[in-house]
Amino acid sequence: MLNPTAGQARRVIPTWVGVAMIGCALATVSAARAEPLTYAQALSMASSDAPIIRAGSLGVEAAESSVEAAGRLPDPRLKFGLNGFPVSGPAAGRLDGIEMTNVQIGLQQDVPSRARRQAERGIADANVDVARAREDIAVWQVRAATGQAWIDLLYAERRLAVLDDLLASLEPLWETAPSGVASGASRPAQSLGPVELRAALDDRRDGLLAGLARARAELSRWTGDPVPSVSGPPPAIDLAPGVFDVDLSQLPALRAYGALRDRAEADLDLARSGRRPDWSFEASYARRDPMFGDLVSVGASVRLPLFQGSRQEPLIAARAADTRRVTAEREAAEREWTAMLQADLADYEGARTRWIRARDVVLPNLRTRADLETASYGAGRAGIMDVLDTFTALANARLDVLDKEADVARRAVRFTLTYGSDQ
């Protein structure tokens, strides 16, 4: 075997030192990570830390800051200029001795109609309500997603623990199969069966590990915990009958239509204010040659909405149509949520029935079958492959029961956080 040169050794040693340092750093991060999250803690953390909720809060803050400026008079305009300056004739280019020439400075103030300013204030107030409705929807959606992510991680960990326990319990049977061939109790081809069964369970374990990583990433997305884990009991799986009495009008997704309608009506008021005239007032001071004296001017102008049929009325009709559109969209959304509620109820009941059947009928039957096959094997009336097949079926049944329980728990959490009082 060749020994590395001194230079190669110097290059190898820092590499291993770096690997060791990385390993220590990862161990430190793992040790310093947050404590396992209970269900309530995960919901609380997501409700306060999720970026989409912070964005919603900033939207409310922005809308509230705009209210104070809404409906105010526009900024005044400062006017200045040179008037009556001759550019031809005997006095061309002269500022003195010309009666009409003056330097003018003035102030102009636009005064929109009272109806327009009230409509602008109404739009600003409606924007605040819309921003708050969006924030409520964001909190509602984040809590529902976080609850389901917590359930997914909990049952991903439970599935993996159950499968590892099953693999450990089957280990003696894997070792018994070759001895059966050696003793002549089993055919040589039967020795290959356990290999296939074990590979299938190992494949399933790999899938569970991938599912665990996905569940952890999803919970990390909502809570901000880089390596989240869960602790504590899950929420109730069996929903109380009173939970099914849902008032859909209180869902944030439907409450938001009230704010959207208020905004549409405020836009309609703004369009209607176009029928009212807007005013503008100005005052100016003109400096002339002292021999002629200075001038003061005041004046006013008004916008005349004379062609309402081709200008204001089409805009009013458009905004009125928007108001009716919001009403129609709310009705469509209410029907959609009604259908979703009925479907979710049916899906929950179906999933719960399948879980109870698998837990109370299929699994006990397979346990009895495994006991009987074990007794038959001990009495010499069954082969090792029969026992392995039975215990593999029992392992799959236990995982299937856990899968169905996870499905029921996920649906129960989704129902409670979406429709229930916990919304």
Image (tube, rainbow, N blue to C red):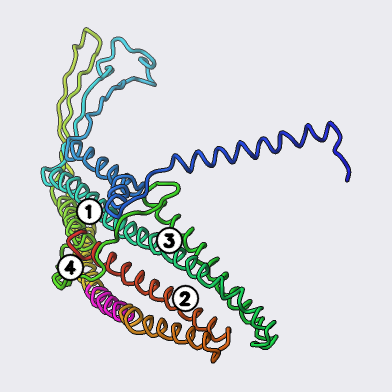
Which labelled disc corresponds to residue 357?
Answer: none
Callout 4: SS: helix
The residue at the point 17 percent across, 59 percent down is 258
Place residue 370 in its image quadrant. bottom left
The residue at the point 40 percent across, 52 percent down is 229
Which mark is nearer the camera, 3 or 1?
A: 3
Q: Earlier along the polypeptide chain: callout 3 or callout 4?
A: 3
> Do the CB atoms of the residues marked 4 and 1 lie less than 8 Å apart?
no
In the image, residue 283 lies at what x, y percent?
Answer: 17, 25
In the image, residue 177 lies at what x, y percent?
Answer: 62, 79
Q: Earlier along the polypeptide chain: callout 3 or callout 1?
A: 1
Amino acid beneath label 4 = Leu
Residue under pointer 1: 133
Residue under pointer 4: 248
Q: Earlier along the polypeptide chain: callout 1 or callout 2?
A: 1
Q: Earlier along the polypeptide chain: callout 2 or callout 3?
A: 3
What secondary structure predominates along the stretch shown in magenta?
Answer: helix
Crowding near pointer 3: few (<14 within 10 Å), some, many (20+)?
A: many
The residue at the point 39 percent across, 43 percent down is 34
Residue sitting farthest toward the bottom: 381
Callout 2: SS: helix
Which labelled disc corresponds to residue 157?
Answer: 3
Q: Nearer the viewer, residue 178 or 134?
A: 178
Place residue 408 in its image quadrant. bottom left
Residue under pointer 2: 395
- Look at the picture and state if 85 lies above or below 187: above
> Do the CB atoms of the residues marked 2 and 3 lie less than 8 Å apart?
no
Q: Earlier along the polypeptide chain: callout 4 or callout 2?
A: 4
Measure the C-alpha gap from mark 1 to mark 2. Answer: 48 Å
- Look at the picture and state if 259 lies above or below 190: above
Measure the C-alpha gap from mark 4 to mark 2. Answer: 42 Å
